[in-house]
């Protein structure tokens, strides 16, 4: 059978002789056959002859998945909205997308469907639509402003699910993958459906407040997505020691820069099991760096996956630069989005906004963000470079640096820092640490020590929240 989209995948596995638990959350489960049956029922409920958007915003992974599949099977377009987003933002994107139905949260004047309503009708044959038509709609993180709505084709959603096979991530039938990252963004079509394609159970659960190792052991987790920040938090709690940590055979990292100390920690703890993925909402996966690359080529995010391409270009053009030179990373692949809703269609290449370079062997290095490059007193400064120096302090758990307008220097830097132990370091100690390692023009003018840094739904540090905090309480 030729799979054209994710509904074909579910129908194919739902008819297979062997059934298995596909999704699990808070003790509730859904088998693949149940998903196939509920998909048909939801399609019967949602089919109205239009391709109108269905906004899905619920913390329930099973309800979320049934709504997603039902909308696709009914020929409609599911838009995934993080349930933690405020009602005002949900209302805004519903208007922008022209959504006429919601699954999960209720909005005045918009039809709402509950899970019980979605599955009460007899299953129907799915509406057949071309694979190149719109599949999911995803919101960007909006870390620096209002999120954009990313438009993906059905074929791109399915291609994202196949990336696990392309990168040879170690999941197989019977494995159990724990996903703590929100399932309303790029991890959903990539990680979740990649696991289901491999007949692996996906366990949805937030990061436990107590022992993560005990959670892993109790739920028999064999693989997981563990970003750099989550790894550092886990290490602070239980040292990554115990039976739960020992049983991990696959650890996928990504979503933010993997610094050298954290990379070393992960590769020593799980030899042969660590994979660093480089991707984004617009192109779910571009490259992968298995452990040997992380060890032998520090800072590399690996080589582009099969069927994917990347090039380094001069800023503002598509003209490639020489091997080894820094420029903007441009990418393309079968899981690339078609454009932002309400804007022009995406071009042949997607300009990531990341800075990078290739080495002579074709390995890609991400060196920063173009938006992170600022001018301080006439000097070019990378805010990420400064943040990395602060994160290297032994008492620092995480750090971020933002650039603010300044009447004297045009731009000034401010650092936001979360410590491993409260009171272990102060602003003066951090300032001394940075001045010993960077020139004066790269030293932040202020250090704000927080209990933890604010994050967006995808787990990335929220630069928007840091700017709002700086505006409310000037240093």
Image: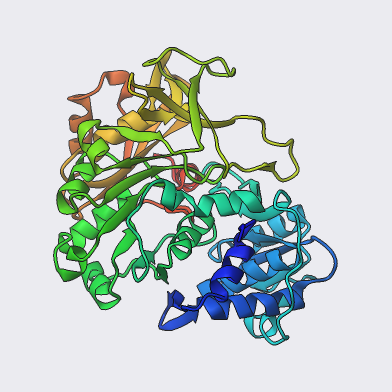
Residue visible at 68% across and 42% down?
Answer: 340
The type of colouring in the image is: rainbow
Q: Taking the image as drawn, is residue 4 in sight?
A: yes
Count of marks, rendered view:
0
Residue visible at 23% across and 39% down?
Answer: 292
Q: Is residue 442 above or below residue 230?
A: above
Judge by depth and name the residue closer to the eye, 404 or 51: 51
Q: Is residue 311 above or below residue 290?
A: above
Residue visible at 78% across and 66% down?
Answer: 100
Task: Work out which quarter of the rendered image holds the N terminus and state it.
Answer: bottom right
Q: Is residue 371 above or below residue 277?
A: above
Q: Where does the image place residue 256, in percent across and percent down from the top left?
A: 39, 44
Q: Where does the image place residue 396, in percent across and percent down from the top left?
A: 22, 45
Judge by depth and name the residue closer to the eye, 242 or 9: 9
Judge by depth and name the residue closer to the eye, 434 or 107: 107
Res. 241 image quadrant: bottom left
Task: Work out which quarter of the rendered image holds the C terminus and state it.
Answer: top left
Q: Which residue is situated farthest in the right direction here?
A: 49
Q: Where does the image place residue 470, in percent across and percent down from the top left?
A: 45, 42
Instruction: Report the side of 402 relative to 447 (left or right).
Output: right
Q: Where does the image place residue 359, in percent across and percent down from the top left?
A: 34, 21
Judge by depth and name the residue closer to the eye, 73 or 93: 73
Q: Taking the image as drawn, is residue 449 in sight?
A: no
Residue visible at 66% across and 83% down?
Answer: 119
């Amino acid at each position: 059978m030729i799979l054209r989209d994710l509904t074909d995948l579910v129908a194919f596995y739902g008819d297979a002789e062997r059934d298995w638990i596909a999704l699990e959350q808070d003790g509730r489960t859904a088998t693949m056959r149940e998903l196939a049956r509920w998909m048909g029922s939801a399609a019967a409920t949602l089919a109205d002859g239009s391709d109108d958007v269905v906004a899905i915003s619920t913390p329930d992974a099973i309800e979320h998945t049934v709504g997603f599949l039902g909308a696709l099977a009914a020929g409609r377009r599911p838009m995934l909205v993080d349930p933690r987003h405020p009602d005002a933002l949900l209302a805004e994107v519903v208007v922008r997308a022209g959504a006429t139905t919601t699954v999960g949260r209720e909005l005045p004047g918009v039809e709402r469907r509950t899970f019980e309503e979605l599955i009460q009708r007899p299953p129907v044959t799915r509406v057949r639509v071309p694979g190149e038509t719109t599949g999911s709609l995803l919101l960007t993180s909006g870390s620096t402003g209002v999120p954009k709505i990313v438009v993906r084709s059905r074929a791109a959603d399915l291609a994202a699910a196949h990336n696990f096979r392309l990168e040879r991530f170690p999941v197989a039938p019977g494995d159990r993958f724990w996903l703590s990252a929100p399932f309303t963004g790029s991890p959903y079509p990539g990680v979740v459906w990649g696991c289901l394609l491999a007949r692996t159970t996906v366990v949805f659960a937030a990061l436990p407040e107590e022992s993560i190792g005990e959670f892993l052991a109790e739920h028999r987790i064999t693989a997981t997505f563990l970003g750099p920040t989550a790894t550092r938090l886990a290490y602070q709690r239980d040292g990554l020691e115990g039976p739960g940590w020992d049983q991990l055979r696959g650890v996928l990292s990504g979503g933010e820069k993997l610094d050298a100390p954290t990379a070393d920690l992960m590769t020593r703890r799980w030899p042969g099991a660590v994979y660093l993925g480089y991707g984004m909402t617009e192109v779910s996966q571009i490259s992968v760096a298995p452990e040997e690359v992380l060890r032998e080529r520090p800072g590399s995010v690996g080589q582009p996956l099969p069927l994917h391409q990347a090039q380094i270009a001069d800023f503002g053009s598509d003209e490639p630069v020489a091997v080894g030179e820094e420029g903007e990373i441009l990418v393309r692949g079968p899981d690339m989005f078609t454009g932002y809703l309400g804007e022009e269609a995406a071009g042949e290449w997607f300009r990531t906004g990341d800075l990078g370079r290739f080495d002579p062997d074709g390995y890609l290095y991400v060196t920063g963000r173009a938006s992170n490059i600022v001018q301080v007193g006439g000097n070019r400064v990378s805010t990420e470079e400064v943040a990395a120096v602060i994160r290297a302090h032994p008492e620092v758990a995480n750090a971020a640096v933002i650039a603010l307008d300044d009447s004297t220097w045009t731009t000034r830097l401010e650092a936001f820092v979360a410590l491993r132990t409260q009171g272990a370091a102060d602003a003066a100690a951090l300032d001394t640490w940075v001045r010993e390692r960077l020139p004066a023009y790269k030293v932040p003018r202020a250090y704000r020590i927080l209990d933890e840094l604010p994050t967006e739904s995808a787990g990335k540090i929220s630069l928007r929240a840091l700017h709002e905090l700086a505006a409310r309480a000037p240093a």
